[in-house]
Image: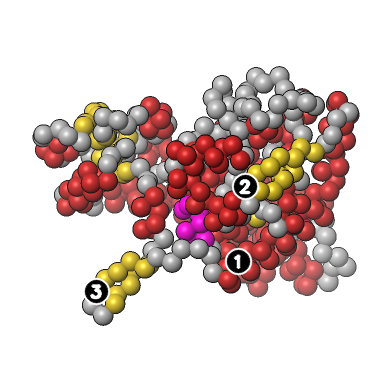
Amino acid sequence: MTRENKRSLFLMLMKIDLFLLLALSFFLIMGLNTPYLLNISRTAAIVAFGFTVLFLLFMNIYQGFDMQHEQSRHIIFSTIISVLFTDAGAFFELMIMNFNENNRSTLLPEWADIGCLALCLLLQILWIIFYTRASKFIYYRMTPPRRCCVITSGEANLEQLSERLALYRKRYMIEETLSCDAPDLFDRIKQFDQVFLYGLPGDQRTRLLRYCYGIRKPVQYDMELIDVISQSGASEILDDVPFISIDLGLTLEQRVAKRALDILFSAVALIVLWPVMLGCVVAIRLEDGGPALFRQERATLNGRVFRIHKFRTMSVGADSETSVYDDDSRITRVGRVLRRWRLDEIPQVIDILRGDMSVVGPRPEMLSNVREYTNVMPEFSYRLRVKAGLTGYAQIAGKYNTSPKDKMMMDLMYIDHYSLLNDIKLILRTVTVFYKPDSTAAFERAPGDGENAGK
């Protein structure tokens, strides 16, 4: 068995072991107040099936226990979120079974049930933390970092790439940076375990990709527009000639389904969140007596301009057209709390209900940013092929200092791979931004975008 297969087997066994422990914790503790859950019964079988399906579903959505690609704190949080939703679903299922079999007068759980669920969650969290730490330790003892080289052109700025790769130093050990024009480049590539291609002209990148593919050398390269377009295509054979078929844009059915989801989401959000909105309004008004809402022109579908609504987080009269920094005195005390937990964005559900925005889509940029970025990258305007969104791939996966180009690529990836199921998945994944402080922080004296800079 190869070393790669051993690592894959280890990860698979750890995932299975963790699942069994989490499921066993749920059944043993919930069985304290529901004894027949521990016996061979219809209730036990149905709850076990539901727990398994929900666990697999939410682990897929939140990429739980992704040992190979995520850092420990991300793994712990995403797995906890997955188990939290799994337990909630299985608990609701158990309450339905109790109602039917014990002829309860209400579906509401007893205090003993709630206490057992809380104890179960606590034990599961401890298991997740322990298994993540232990698995990471063992995995990296089995998997020394790959010896890597970066191949680039003389014009590429490697600073941002170096910062990102430094976060994965247990996976990648960058030993050398090579020029794409080096005469002995192919021979030197053979000396490394993996190759990174960064900032290369199209013809040079294609040449190196073909070579690495031919010698089966693992390779990673930064994404360009042509890559997004190619990935959105479907393979098709016309007679006996293979083609890539690309059909850009949302179909009529997709637009109708997306609008239906927007209306449903925004209506439910307004009903559920009105107490939170009222609290935000009161807090803002009590601090300085100024208006609670902030309005600003932003760009949405096909470049149409609309006025976005947010809770005001800066002092009255502050210049909202300039960057916002970590130590910015214009941000109010209430505003810092609103920004940290993204409560200032709740009024955007009104914009969604009105049809100016969508729940999922590219971030609504200020008009000045749209002009600036489009001048540098004409393809930036392609983001406006769908409505601006409250959340999206770039908002979830990106950081406050992610470059405009990389955010644009994420937005185009979302647009060209659109599906209603993916929208629902991204909505559920939005909760992950709360454990990533760098996704909500203001800029550290770097260019931003006014009232919503750094978000």
- 169 to the left or right of 28: left
Residue that mark 2 sits on: 299
Quadrant position of the C terminus in the picture: top right
Q: Earlier in the sequence, mark 1 or mark 2?
A: 1
Q: Is residue 443 visible?
A: yes
Q: Main secondary structure of the magenta part?
A: helix
Residue that mark 1 sits on: 255
Q: Secondary structure at mark 1?
A: helix
Inter-mark Cα distance, 1 to 2: 19 Å
Depth check: give the residue in front, 216 or 85.
216
Q: Residues within 10 Å of mark 3 (few under 14, many from 20)?
A: few
Depth check: give the residue in front, 12 or 412.
412
Residue that mark 3 sits on: 241
Which contiguous range is marked in magenta? 411-418
Depth check: give the residue in front, 121 or 222.
222
Inter-mark Cα distance, 3 to 2: 42 Å
Q: Residues within 10 Å of mark 1 (few under 14, many from 20)?
A: some
Taking the spot 59% from the left edge, 51% from the top edge, the residue there is: 303
- 218 to the left or right of 170: left
